Image (tube, rainbow, N blue to C red):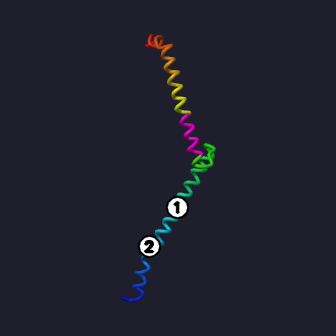
């Protein structure tokens, strides 16, 4: 076995590692670009500067939606109670 072949064999793991590092950097760069775009969308459409702000806004909006849903159900029940007989005559 020649010295150059042995050296080439011993460098192969380093070449593989370099390829993996390059691929990981590219993947990281793409992920960072996606994150930047998502943060930009959060800011433009929802006025949130951070993911934490978006989570809080989501929590508040979810509570509001639950409250409004409950209010609607109650109003619907009262309407049905008040007008149910009249409505059934129309059917």
Q: Nearer the viewer, residue 23 or 59?
A: 59
Dot 1 or dot 2, earlier in sequence: 2
Q: Which residues are magenta?
A: 53-63
Q: Position of residue 75 (x, y in %)?
A: 53, 21
Q: Secondary structure at mark 1?
A: helix
Tag of residue 28: 1
Judged left or right of residue 35, residue 6 is: left
| Quadrant position of the N terminus in the picture | bottom left
CA–CA distance in space, label 1 to label 2: 18 Å
- Where 9 falls versus 81 (above or below)? below
In the rendered image, the residue lying farthest to the left is: 1
Secondary element type, mark 2:
helix
The reply to whether discs 1 and 2 touch (Cβ–Cβ < 8 Å) is no
Residue 25 lies, in percent from the top left, at: 52, 65
Q: Residue at x 46, y 11 (%)?
A: 85
Q: Which residue is mark 2?
A: 16
Q: Position of residue 86 (x, y in %)?
A: 48, 11
């Amino acid at each position: 076995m020649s010295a150059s072949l042995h050296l080439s064999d011993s460098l192969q793991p380093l070449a593989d590692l370099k390829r993996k590092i390059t691929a990981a950097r590219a993947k990281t760069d793409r992920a960072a670009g996606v994150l930047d775009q998502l943060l930009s969308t959060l800011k433009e459409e929802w006025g949130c500067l951070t993911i934490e702000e978006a989570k809080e806004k989501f929590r508040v909006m979810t509570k509001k939606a639950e409250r409004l849903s409950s209010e609607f159900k109650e109003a619907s029940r009262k309407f049905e109670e008040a007008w149910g007989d009249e409505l059934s005559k129309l059917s």
